[in-house]
Image: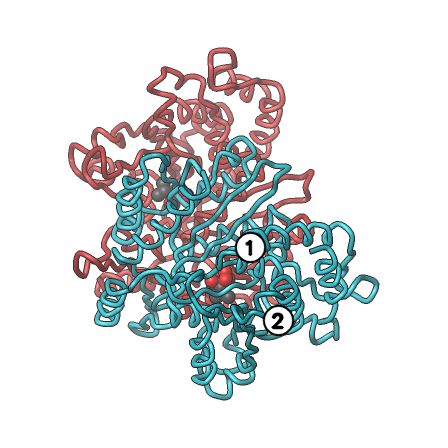
Chain colours: A red, B cyan
Amino acid sequence: IVEEQLARVERMKQDPGPVDYETMDKIIIGCCGGDGIGPAITAEAERVLKAVLKDEVESGKIEFRTIEGLTIENRIAVNKAIPDDVLEELKACDIILKGPTTTPSKGDGPNIESANVAMRRELDLFANVRPVSVPELGIDWTFYRENTEGEYVLGSRGIHIDEDVAFDFRVITTQGVKRIARAAFEFARKNGKKRVAIITKANILKKTDGKFLELCYEVAREYPEIEADDWFVDIISANLINEKVRSGFEVFVLPNLYGDIITDEAAQIQGGVGTAGSANVGNRYAMFEAIHGSAPRMVETGRAQYANPASMIKAAELLLRHIGYKDKADCVIRALNIANETVKLTGRSDGATGAEFADCVINNL
Amino acid sequence: IVEEQLARVERMKQDPGPVDYETMDKIIIGCCGGDGIGPAITAEAERVLKAVLKDEVESGKIEFRTIEGLTIENRIAVNKAIPDDVLEELKACDIILKGPTTTPSKGDGPNIESANVAMRRELDLFANVRPVSVPELGIDWTFYRENTEGEYVLGSRGIHIDEDVAFDFRVITTQGVKRIARAAFEFARKNGKKRVAIITKANILKKTDGKFLELCYEVAREYPEIEADDWFVDIISANLINEKVRSGFEVFVLPNLYGDIITDEAAQIQGGVGTAGSANVGNRYAMFEAIHGSAPRMVETGRAQYANPASMIKAAELLLRHIGYKDKADCVIRALNIANETVKLTGRSDGATGAEFADCVINNL
Ligand SMILES: CC(C)[C@H](C(=O)O)[C@@H](O)C(=O)O
Ligand SMILES: CC(C)[C@H](C(=O)O)[C@@H](O)C(=O)O
C-alpha cells in the first residue's frame, strides 16, 4: 500500500501538465450512459451538445463516440469496476460525458468498487469542480473537491485485524494537495474571486489534514491578491445554511470525503442534487457527470423517459466551458433556465418527458 | 497502535454496564468552566442547576464541585490535553458540566490534543447524544454520534511516510458499534420512536463503515418494532435541509466524524450551534457541554458577560434528564423558552448580560 502511494507520487511529479484543447487537432468526446436512468438522460444531454457543437463536428474539430459497456451487468460479469475494454475506449477519448452508475452493494452481487471512483483514479481526474449558484440568495460558490486521495485511495482495502477490530486508511500527499490547491486558486484568479476557504478537520486529523491545510496556505502565497482562510468541516456544514455568513464564501478547496458531503448539502440549497453537475478534471482527461444516482426505481416502474436530464445538461455545460467554448456554455445555461421555467417535469406521465425538456433547451439555444 | 485497540476491546468486553443513579447515595456533579466565555456561561448554567436541585443538594443526594484547572494556560504549561490532577478530580465526580475548551492550533503553542476528545476517551463517554428540535418545521431529531472511535481514536497519531506522503487511521470495533447502536435503539424504544437511520459511507469505507452498518442492522433485529434504514452521509447532509423528507427522520446513529459534521448542520437549522447542547454519555461517567467553541474574541473585547448561556443551560437540561429528573428537565426547558422569547441578548452592551438571561430562567422555573 505504501509502495503504491510512493509510485503515485512519482507519477504526479512527472505529469507534463494540462493539455491545450485549442491547439489539439481533434477533441474526442465519449458519451457513456451508465445505469438506471443514466442512458436516457445522457442521450438528451448528448443531443444538446451536438446541437451546440454542430459546426465543430462538421469541421472535424470535435468527434463524438458512444461507449456502451459501462453497465452494472457487464461490471458484475467481469467482476471489475470498469471492464478492460471499456477502460481502453475511455482512454482513447479526451473528454467523457458520463451518466450515473450503480455501485453493487453487498446484498445483490459481488463487492465491486464504484465505477465512478475507479474512473477518477484511472484517468487521474484530480479536481472535482462543483459550482452552486442561487442568485436570489446571493450564493455563488465553486467547490474544488480533491478527487483522488483521502479515504478514497484505499477505500475498499482497509484491514480486519481480527473479528473485532477494523482499520481504514486515509492518504494525503504533497503533490496531491498542491495540484488541487493550485486549481482552486487559479480558478479564483481567472474569475475575479477574492476569497478561497480551505476546509479541513486538522484539529483531529493532524497528519493528513494538517498537511492539506499547510500546503494550501503555501500555495495561497503565490496568489497574494486572494484572501485565504480556513474552517473546520463541521462548522462549514452549519455556515452553508447560515444566512448571515454564507454569501461571503466564494471558492472552497477541500479533501475528497468532505467535498462529497458538503457539496451534496450545497446542491440541496440550489434545489436538490438533481440540479447540479460536476466536472472531474485531470491534466490529460476530464469527465462530466450528474451528482445524483441512477434511480433504479424509476426504471423498474417504467418511468425512465420521464427522468429530468437537467443535471446532465448542466454537466454538458461544464464540459463546454472546460474545453474553451464559454459562449456556447452560457448559451446552454440560458436555454436550460428557460426550460426549467416553462417545462413541467413530474417524473411521471402527467409531466413532460426528458426528451421534451431537451427539445425545449435545444429550441432556445 | 493495534495492541492498544485490542486492549480497548478487552476493556469494553469487561465493562459492567451503566450505573444506576437512583440507587446511588450521592451524585457528584463537577462544574468545569473551560476557556474563553466558558467560565461565564458555565457559571450561569450552574446557577440554574443549583436552583432546580435545591432540595437534593440540601438532602445530600447531590453534591456540586468546582473543577478549576482545565484552562488552556494550564494545559500548555504541562503539555497535556488534561492535566493529571484535573483528570483525577474529574474521575472523582459522576457527572461533569463542561464549558467549551480551546484547542491550541499549530501557530500559537504546543500541539496538544483537544481536551474535549481526551475527556471523551479517558472517561469512555461513548455516546454523544444531540437532540435537535424545531416544532414548527416538524423536526424532532436525536443524533447518536459514536464518540470514541473512527478518526478520533488515533487522530494525532497518523504517520508521515516521507516528506510527501501522510497516512491517518480510522478504527471501528464490534464492541464500539454495538454499544452505540444499542443506545440509539434503546432510546427509540423508550421514547416511542418508530425509525432509526444508520448513516455511513460504506460504499467507500468498506471495512470500517461496512462493519458499522452490518452491526447496526444486527442490533436492529433485537428491536423488531423499530424500522431501521441506512443512508450515505453525503445524501443525509442534503436530506436534513430537504423539506420533503426531513420530518420523516427521528433517530440517527452514526460514526464519530459524520456525527461531528451532520450535527452542526442540524443545530444550525434549529437556530445555530449556540442553541444546542450535547450529552457525552458512558456507563460510569457522563459529561454535558455546549456544541460551540470558546469565542476567545468575546473575551478579548471584554464582552464575556454578554455571552449567551442558552447552550450551557440546554446542556444542564440534558444532565437533569440523564440522571433521572425528567420533570425538572422539562421545567428548565419551559423557563429557557420564556427567556429566549423575552430577554434580548445581542452579545454587546446594548443587550442583556448572560446573568440577566439566567435570572430570567431561574425566575420562571
Ligand atoms: C457514487 C459515490 C462513490 C460518489 C462519491 O462518493 O464520490 C458520489 O457520491 C459523488 O459525490 O460523486
Ligand atoms: C472541539 C472538537 C474536537 C469537537 C469534535 O470534533 O468533536 C467539536 O467539534 C464537537 O463537535 O464537540
Observer-nearest residue: A251 or B261?
B261
The picture quadrant for ligand 1 comes to top left
Query: In the rendering, at what x and y percent does residue B202 appear?
Result: 31, 46
Query: Secondary structure beneath disc 2?
Result: helix
* Residue located beneath label 2 in the image: B38
Query: In the rendering, at what x and y percent does residue B78 appear?
Result: 47, 87
Residue B86, above or below A109: below
The kind of residue on which mark 2 rests is: Gly
Can residue A28 be seen?
A: no
Residue A116, above or below B28: above
Observer-nearest residue: A261 or B283?
B283
Q: Is residue B231 left or right of residue B108?
A: left
* Residue located beneath label 1 in the image: A236
Query: Secondary structure beneath disc 1?
Result: helix
Point 39% across, 19% down: residue: A304
Give the number of the disc on residue B149. Answer: none
The kind of residue on which mark 1 rests is: Ile
Q: Disc 1 versus disc 2: distance between alpha carbons?
A: 22 Å
Query: In the rendering, at what x and y percent does residue B137 appear?
Result: 61, 37
Observer-nearest residue: B87 or A169?
B87
| Residue ranking furthest to the right | B350
Query: In the rendering, at what x and y percent does residue B191 appear?
Result: 46, 42
| Residue ranking furthest to the bottom | B77
Point 44% across, 60% down: residue: B22
In which quarter of the view is residue B41 placed? bottom right
Tag 1 subunit? A
Q: Quadrant of the C terminus of chain A?
A: top right
